[in-house]
Amino acid sequence: MSEAALRISTRAASSLTDEVLVSRLRSGDRSAGEELIRRHHEPLLRYLTRLGGSAHLAEELVQQTWISVLEHLDQFR
């Protein structure tokens, strides 16, 4: 399937569960990954900033979290 055929619109993506988005991301749909990041980046950043008190450190931790998610995508259920 072509990348264009796999891509989903932002509106359609917002109605999908995280599980469906992870499945689509595993299949190569980068827009599914973009939607997961859109959904979870800010809440995670706010949480880590409150936890550690440093916005800069929190942003670095969020970036490392997303890298880890992508590196271990095959292990998510």
Image (tube, rainbow, N blue to C red):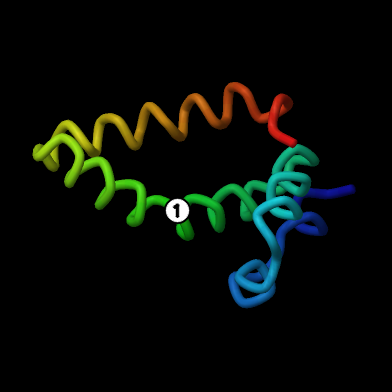
Residue occupying image coordinates x 55% and y 52% = 36
Amino acid beneath label 1: His
Residue occupying image coordinates x 71% and y 48% = 29
In terms of image quadrants, where is residue 11? bottom right
Residue 1 vs residue 40: left or right?
Answer: right
Residue occupying image coordinates x 65% and y 54% = 18
Residue 63 vs residue 38: left or right?
Answer: left
Asked if residue 13 is positioned above or below residue 22 in the image, the reply reads below
Residue occupying image coordinates x 25% and y 41% = 48
Residue 56 vs residue 4: left or right?
Answer: left
Q: Residue 22 at x, y = what percent?
A: 70, 45
Among all residues in the image, which is located at the extreme bottom? Answer: 11
- Neighbour class for label 1 at 10 Å: few (<14), some, many (≥20)? few
Q: Residue 70 at x, y = what percent?
A: 57, 30
Q: Secondary structure at mark 1?
A: helix
- Identify residue for label 1: 40
